Amino acid sequence: MNLIIAASSGGFSDILRETADTFGWNWKLFISQVASFCIVALLLRRFAYRPILAVLEDRRRKIEEGQLNAEKIRKELAEAEKRYQEILAKGNADAQRMIDEARASAANHAESPGNASLSAAGGAVMGAGERKGRAIPCSPPAPASPSSTLSCAAIRPSPARSASASSS
């Protein structure tokens, strides 16, 4: 309704002037505030906004590098675990092969005609020790030296020999 009255009485500029006076608007003050705002905005953009963006970009880049390094380390760990399992399996297979070879060598050595008496003597020594309630420990033969199978029988005298030696 004021618009209709303003149009008939003097115009739109009178209404604006009245409204500006009612709210205390001063055009000179408004221009200075706009200029101050622009200056502050430019200074903040130059000295605050760009450095903050640079820090944020640097942080984003470091996080990305960290994620790439973590992925690389995960892959290396998986490869190392795989190599570990392969080496462990190979070691177990080699150990089993050596055990099987040692058993076969011991069986062949025990079956040869010259060693039958020594094998029987070694068994007698072990059996005599077990009958008296004590076990005579004997280390297993080392695969490198075939004569080590004789070590237990040759080193430990049988109870019959030790009894005859002590009575004389």
Image (cartoon, rainbow, N blue to C red):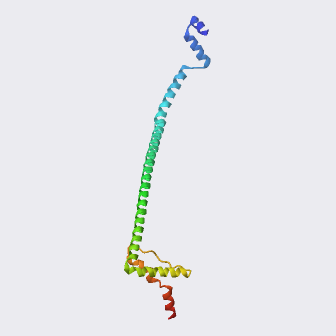
Residue 5 in the figure: left or right of residue 111: right
The extreme top residue here reads 8
Quarter residue 54 falls in: top left
Picture coordinates of residue 102, whole percent (x, y): 40, 71
* Farthest-out residue, bottom: 168
Q: Residue at x 57, y 14 (%)?
A: 17
Q: Please indicate whether residue 5 sits to the left or right of residue 96 in the image.
A: right
Q: Is residue 79 above or below residue 101?
A: above
Is 154 above or below relative to 48?
Answer: below
Q: Nearer the viewer, residue 114 or 25?
A: 114
Where does the image place residue 45, in percent across and percent down from the top left?
47, 33
- Residue 25, given in percent of the width and then of the height, sits at 58, 20
Is 109 or 155 nearer to us in this picture?
109
Q: With 1 as the anchor, is 61 left or right in this view?
A: left
Between 97 and 124, the one lying in front of the other is 124
Instruction: Name the quarter where the N terminus is drawn.
Output: top right
Q: Is residue 99 above or below residue 120?
A: above
In this picture, is 166 found above or below 13? below
Residue shown at 46% from the left, 39% from the top: 51
The percent position of residue 123, horizontal first and vertical second, equals 47, 79
What residue appears at the point 39 percent right and 76 percent down from the top-left corner?
111
